[in-house]
């Protein structure tokens, strides 16, 4: 019996030591959370508010400038499309895809960061609060009386779903497709230009050959005697070649008109397509910037309201600092 009593006392002493150790560790974690991490998170939120305010102003300015564009002053605009133009179009498409990837990663990284931080903080809820959280599935499990940082992170996490990030990614993807279509149009214009150039060279070659044949015929008439039949045959030959040249010339005019139409279409897509595409992207970013700024500003305001309230770990009571 004495041995049992001694064993129980020893176990009880160990339990007390373990509890005190746990309380000490818990206190350190609370201090880390409330005195070090909380101010840093609030400062981060304030920084994000300022950042997206600047981004909002920038995107609004960019969109305003773009809406005023009526034509391009670039020296190469309105001229034949060349390989450097197509390369620039490909580079623009690549930049848009990179922009889309970076934006998507930014939103995903922020959401993952808040989820990880919120998940880590919930691990240190005291049992009674944790029990309360399991009993209710709607809203913040710890209500407004939970640890300030936990409440802030919960609001931040739920607010992320309100961001119109899908509109931004959609506009970037759509614009990227339009730029790819412009690249294809430039290719068609180049192909038509090569066709016109080839036909023009062929026409020049045949014209020179005809002129030489005509010159030889005229010279032979002066220096050589030819029968009427031979003369008539040569006249028919020259007439046939002349008709062929005229047909090629007409076909060339048709192909030149096609090339001109391709040029106009390329210029139309370049001006209207780029203007519309960038405008859609900037407008979606403006809305995203407004939503981001509002979310961060609201959370900062919430943190300031909670600044005069102290959370007592292990209790659902909240006391004003002034009443301490």
Image (tube, helix red, strand yellow):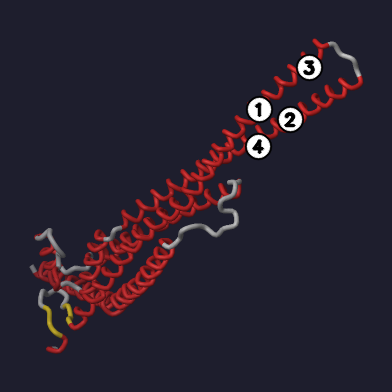
Read off the residue under disc 4.
Answer: 197
Say which residue appears at 60% left-offset and 46% top-offset. 82
Which sits earlier in the primary sequence, circle 2 or circle 3?
2
Q: Residues within 10 Å of mark 3 (few under 14, many from 20)?
A: some
Residue 313 picture location, percent across and down: 17, 75
Residue 133 picture location, percent across and down: 13, 63
Spatial distance from mark 3 to mark 1, Cα to Cα?
A: 18 Å
Quadrant for the C terminus, please: bottom left
Which sits earlier in the primary sequence, circle 4 or circle 1?
4
Say which residue appears at 19% left-offset and 73% top-offset. 147
Read off the residue under disc 2.
Answer: 207
Read off the residue under disc 1.
Answer: 246
- Left or right of 223? Residue 279 is left
Asked whether the viewer can see residue 24, the reply is no
Spatial distance from mark 1 to mark 2, Cα to Cα?
A: 10 Å
Read off the residue under disc 3.
Answer: 234
Quadrant for the N terminus, please: bottom left
Spatial distance from mark 4 to mark 1, Cα to Cα?
A: 17 Å
The circle drawn on residue 156 is none
Spatial distance from mark 4 to mark 3, Cα to Cα?
A: 31 Å
Q: Residues within 10 Å of mark 2 (few under 14, many from 20)?
A: some
User: Given this view, does label 2 or label 3 mark the residue nearer the observer?
Assistant: 3
Which sits earlier in the primary sequence, circle 2 or circle 4?
4
Asked whether the viewer can see residue 74, the reply is yes
- Left or right of 236? Residue 132 is left
């Amino acid at each position: 019996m004495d041995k049992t009593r001694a064993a129980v006392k020893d176990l009880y002493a160990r339990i007390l030591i373990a509890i005190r150790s746990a309380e000490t560790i818990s206190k350190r974690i609370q201090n880390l959370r409330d005195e070090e991490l909380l101010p840093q998170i609030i400062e981060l939120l304030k920084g994000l508010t300022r950042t997206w305010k600047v981004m909002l102003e920038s995107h609004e300015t960019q969109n305003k400038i773009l809406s005023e564009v009526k034509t391009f002053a670039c020296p190469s605009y309105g001229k034949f499309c060349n390989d450097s133009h197509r390369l620039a179009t490909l580079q623009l498409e690549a930049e848009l895809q990179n922009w889309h990837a970076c934006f998507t990663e930014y939103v995903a990284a922020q959401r993952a960061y808040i989820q990880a931080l919120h998940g880590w903080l919930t691990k240190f809820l005291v049992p009674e609060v944790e029990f309360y959280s399991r009993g209710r599935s709607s809203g913040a499990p710890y209500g407004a009386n939970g640890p300030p940082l936990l409440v802030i992170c919960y609001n931040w996490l739920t607010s992320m779903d309100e961001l119109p990030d899908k509109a931004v990614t959609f506009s970037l993807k759509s614009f990227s497709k339009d730029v790819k279509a412009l690249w294809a149009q430039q290719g068609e214009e180049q192909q038509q230009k090569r066709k016109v150039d080839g036909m023009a060279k062929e026409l020049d070659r045949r014209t020179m050959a005809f002129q030489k044949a005509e010159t030889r015929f005229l010279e032979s008439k002066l220096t050589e005697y030819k029968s009427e039949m031979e003369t008539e045959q040569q006249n028919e030959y020259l007439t046939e070649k002349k008709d062929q040249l005229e047909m090629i010339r007409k076909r060339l005019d048709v192909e030149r008109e096609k090339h001109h139409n391709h040029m106009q279409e390329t210029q139309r897509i370049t001006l209207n397509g780029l203007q519309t595409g960038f405008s859609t992207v900037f407008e979606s970013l403006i809305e995203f910037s407004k939503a981001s700024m509002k979310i961060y500003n609201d959370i900062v305001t919430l943190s300031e309201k909670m600044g005069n309230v102290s959370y007592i770990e292990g209790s659902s009571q909240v006391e004003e600092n002034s009443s301490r």
